Image (cartoon, rainbow, N blue to C red):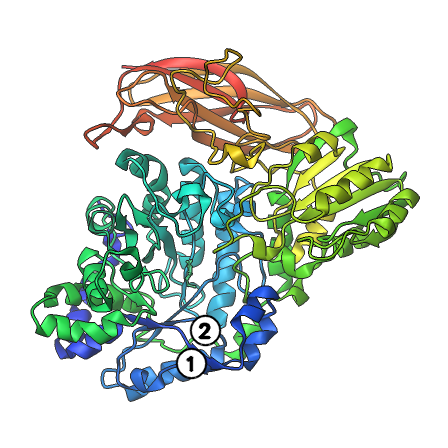
Amino acid sequence: MQTKQSQLIKPEIETKIDGLMAQMTLLEKAGQLTQLGPSIVGGFDFNAFMENPDPEMFKNAQLDFHEDWIGKGEVGAYLGVQGLDEINRLQKIAVEQSRLGIPLLFGLDVIHGYRTIFPIPLAEACSWEPELARKTAEVAAREASAAGLHWTFAPMVDIARDARWGRIAEGAGEDPYLGSAFAAARVRGFQGDDLSDPQHVAACAKHYIGYGGAVAGRDYNTVEMALQTLQDIYLPPFAAAAEAGVLTFMSGFNDLNGVPTSANRYTLTEILRGQLGFNGFVVSDSNSIGELVAHGYAADRKDAGKKALLAGVDMDMVTKSLRFDIPELVEAGVLPLDVVDEAVRRILRVKFLLGLFERPYRSSAENEAANTLSAAHLELAREAARRAIVLLKNEGGILPLSQEKIRKIAVIGPLADSPFDMLGSWAFTGSPRDVVSILSGIKSATQAEVLYAPGCDINGKQPADFAQAIEAAMQAEVVIAVVGESARMSGEAASRLELGLPGHQESLLKALKETGKPLVVVLSNGRPLALPWVAQNADALLETWQLGVQAGPAVADVLFGAYNPSGKLVATVPYVVGQCPIYYNHPNTGRPSGDFWFTSRYIDGPFEPLYPFGFGLSYTTFAYADLEILPGAKKITVSATVTNTGTVMGEEVVQLYIRDVAASRVRPVRELKGFQKILLAPEQGQTVVFELEVASLGFHAEDMQYVVEPGQFKVWVGTNSAEGLEGEFQVR
Ligand code: GLC
């Protein structure tokens, strides 16, 4: 059966590759396996940038691109080169000066937008609308390719179950079924249907594999898991990306059960090539080949390069090991030439499929100007942003705010007017200058007088002085407090030991609460935050994550009711950091948490999360009724009627969960197996039907075979993972 991956093997291209490789020297082959980043040789203080990131700081950097290597055909790809002219200048050296004129592949982290920065992926996934993610990825590809790029190191599809891990911001949360839908959608958006279309880019499923399972939520930390868990929880989004035709994978930094993922033959060859049939190429994460030495898995760089290639890595991101050491390893008979040839073939295959040999130079200044930050792109950014917002609390229906009754609003908090922090992590191609802040969005959306005071800084480096904030609050009819994390507090190398509001922010909220004014808390953050006091004491609570360039208008749309929030959590929100890792699809244990002393619980806090996976409120309400289950040998039809029982139109994400009650391995108490987002007018009802494939109810057994075992299954249709209409069926 033809798959997207098998369709990557085109005889006419393979023949061209044969002809090219027959001419290549060993050094030229080593060059194709080498991805360089520009070496910063001056004019840039990295630590200063990390402390106070400003994209303008790149402008003064003096970079070394090793142009001599390009001219000798000893480089295959670049990352980190920005600007159409610079990319085409380097490409010209490769195409016109090197002996065989093989074009370079230019890649960059275009994770949630290029110039039009969209919500961070974790936020976007809360829309539960994969088609929306496909659209934003398509726009990101259009802007990135207009800027000369061929390849993005996205989507990040790592399952994340621990909010301490800062990279939870970059993916689609904790669930394999939802994560798979977003992985496939993002690949389709980036790559399009025609791989040679110059308005699309090659995608990259990363970080293969298990990276999000880092012990203690500490980035780059070791990962231990059962191979059944690897197959059933962490692999599905990668498999979905492969099924969607993704052209590249990126191996990770982490070791997995003792073997680093950038030299792990079981995952890189047996699973990726054998089980998934992947025909693109694998690039290592930045210097992760060189880091095999630090792992204690390789004796030196040469040993590392050999082990990575033998395991199934094809391209070396910036270690330069393959460039320097392959010729010697092959000539010494230590590394088989056919291993090198297969890696070269995979890389040339992607370059041919992208049309780089026919069209090595992309775009033009006019095309870039016409395709960047266009009105249509900004409108999509606003739509994606408001659909990412999750309403967590709305006591007494304080929201949406009444435009008629409210004459004075106090907007307080360090994130109210903080454009840079709205961009979130992995947005260095964007600019805070393109961001509409939450304060600006509110001011533009209301006739009321808006008073503003930051109240405190984000991280508590400045002493707390709430006087100005309290004064503003006392004059207003409602307080909107915008608090959370800076963009630097999530993403790579940004693990946290605590999950509360950094600095003096919670104290600021308590001081605002003391004023007795209605308190609407707007969170802007890159991970789930454990905020029990806020959940208890805010009158309304909006989780807005980091929403990108249209953060302000999107938040205002929800605050004033221009958009009825429809987001649902894709990662469990813990009550306290001590519960991490915490996720909804957990086994039951023999002593599930309960009132009895000797059960799986804590003596100093709750077992339940603050908010469960799939949770999110609306300005209206929905009722579920009439669950029906029609069993079948291959398919089970499950339906329920959902009615809008409120007074305004609203969208509901109807979720379907199952539980395999007794199996040869303990199974989760809930597994998401379907979702549908529907729009209902007041009093309107709709029967939502799910066709549940029996084949999808299985798991990997002790012998590592995927099985669907006969027996009793429970099923729920509901509004989140903790509630819903319950039924059951038998699998024969
Ligand atoms: C980083 C990240 C990876 C990124 C790569 C290139 O260390 O782990 O996600 O794509 O390097 O920037």
Query: Which is nearer the eye, 676 or 125?
Result: 125
Q: CB at mark 1 closer than 8 A to ligand 1? A: no
Residue 261, given in percent of the width and then of the height, sits at 29, 52
User: Are the residues at dot 2 and dot 1 in contact (C-beta closer than 8 Å)?
Assistant: yes
Numbered badge on residue 148: 2
Ligand number 1: quarter of image = bottom left
Question: Which amino acid is tagged 1?
Answer: Asn
Mark 2 secondary-structure assignment: loop
Q: Is residue 174 left or right of residue 470?
A: left
Could you tell me which residue is drawn at 22 percent across and 60 percent down?
Answer: 298
Numbered badge on residue 642: none
Residue 456 in view (yes/no): yes
Instruction: Indicate the quadrant where residue 26 lies.
Output: bottom left
Numbered badge on residue 88: 1
Question: Which amino acid is tagged 2?
Answer: Gly
| Relative height, residue 509 to residue 344 (above, below) | above
Query: Which is nearer the eye, 130 or 282?
Result: 282
Which quadrant of the rendered structure holds the C terminus? top left
Could you tell me which residue is drawn at 38 percent across and 26 percent down?
Answer: 692
Instruction: Indicate the quadrant where residue 302 lies.
Output: bottom left
